[in-house]
Image (tube, rainbow, N blue to C red):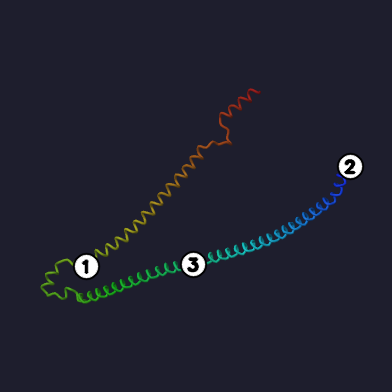
């Protein structure tokens, strides 16, 4: 019994040390947890700052990329417009040069033909004379040719007759064409009128009673009476 009481006293005497040690452990743990919390808060703040900085850098980088892309697009559009305008200018210049060359060729041809026509007229004037051919002949030649027909007069007469004949033929052709159109129009009109007259002639007259209906009415009246 004495041993048991002594052990109890010892245990009682040791409990405050344990409580002190426990309190000190709790304090250290609380301090360490506070430190950890402070560290975690600092880390969170740092992470937030870092993330915001990174986001800012990313946004700046995106803005720079967008600006570069816009500049490139503007440059490409400017180059395209310049190329198209230059191409159009070259095409129009080629057309203008072609037209100039063609006009110069036509001018040269007209000049050549004008000169050729002038030379031909000059040569014709030199080779022809206003003196009639029979006046330049001798008396014997005139006597020999006097009984011959005038071929130039015949040629002139035939030329005039041909021109008159062409005019008459043209008039006859126009008259024939007019008569053919009149004939076709008259035939169409007559056929239309004939069809209309036939339809009116053989159409049943509804406001007149047929003999059959009249006889049936008379028979019905006699039966009733």
Residue 12 on image: x %, y %? 87, 47
Give the distance between the C-alpha atoms of the residues marked 1 and 2, in whole angstroms: 188 Å
Residue 144 on image: x %, y %? 11, 69
The residue drawn where x is 53% and y is 65% is 72
Q: Nearer the viewer, residue 129 or 213?
A: 129
Give the distance between the C-alpha atoms of the residues marked 2 and 3, in whole angstroms: 112 Å
Give the distance between the C-alpha atoms of the residues marked 1 and 3, in whole angstroms: 80 Å
Q: Total marks drawn?
A: 3
Q: Secondary structure at mark 3?
A: helix
Q: Nearer the viewer, residue 216 or 154?
A: 154
- Circle 3: is it few (<14), some (14-19), or many (20+) Cα within 10 Å? few
Q: Nearer the viewer, mark 1 or mark 3?
A: 3
Residue 24 on image: x %, y %? 80, 54
User: The C terminus lies in which quarter of the figure?
Assistant: top right
Q: Nearer the viewer, residue 19 or 192?
A: 19
Q: Earlier in the sequence, mark 2 or mark 3?
A: 2
State the residue position of label 3. 79
State the residue position of label 2. 2
Q: Earlier in the sequence, mark 1 or mark 2?
A: 2
Q: Secondary structure at mark 2?
A: helix
- Circle 1: is it few (<14), some (14-19), or many (20+) Cα within 10 Å? few
State the residue position of label 1. 153
């Amino acid at each position: 019994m004495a041993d048991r009481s002594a052990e109890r006293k010892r245990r009682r005497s040791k409990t405050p040390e344990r409580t002190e040690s426990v309190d000190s452990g709790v304090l250290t743990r609380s301090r360490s947890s506070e430190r950890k919390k402070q560290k975690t808060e600092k880390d969170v703040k740092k992470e937030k700052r870092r993330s915001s900085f990174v986001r800012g850098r990313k946004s700046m980088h995106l803005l720079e990329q967008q600006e570069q892309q816009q500049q490139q697009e503007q440059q490409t559009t400017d180059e395209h417009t310049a190329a198209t305008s230059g191409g159009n200018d070259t095409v129009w210049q080629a057309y203008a040069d072609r037209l100039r060359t063609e006009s110069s060729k036509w001018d040269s041809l007209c000049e050549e033909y004008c000169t050729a026509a002038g030379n031909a007229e000059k040569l014709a004037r030199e080779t022809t004379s206003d003196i009639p051919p029979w006046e330049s002949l001798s008396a014997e030649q005139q006597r020999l040719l006097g009984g011959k027909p005038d071929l130039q007069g015949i040629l002139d007469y035939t030329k005039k007759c041909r021109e008159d004949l062409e005019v008459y033929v043209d008039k006859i052709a126009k008259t024939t064409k007019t008569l053919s159109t009149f004939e076709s129009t008259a035939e169409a009109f007559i056929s239309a009128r004939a069809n209309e007259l036939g339809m009116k002639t053989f159409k049943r007259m509804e406001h007149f009673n047929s003999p059959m209906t009249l006889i049936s009415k008379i028979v019905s009246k006699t039966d009733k009476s």
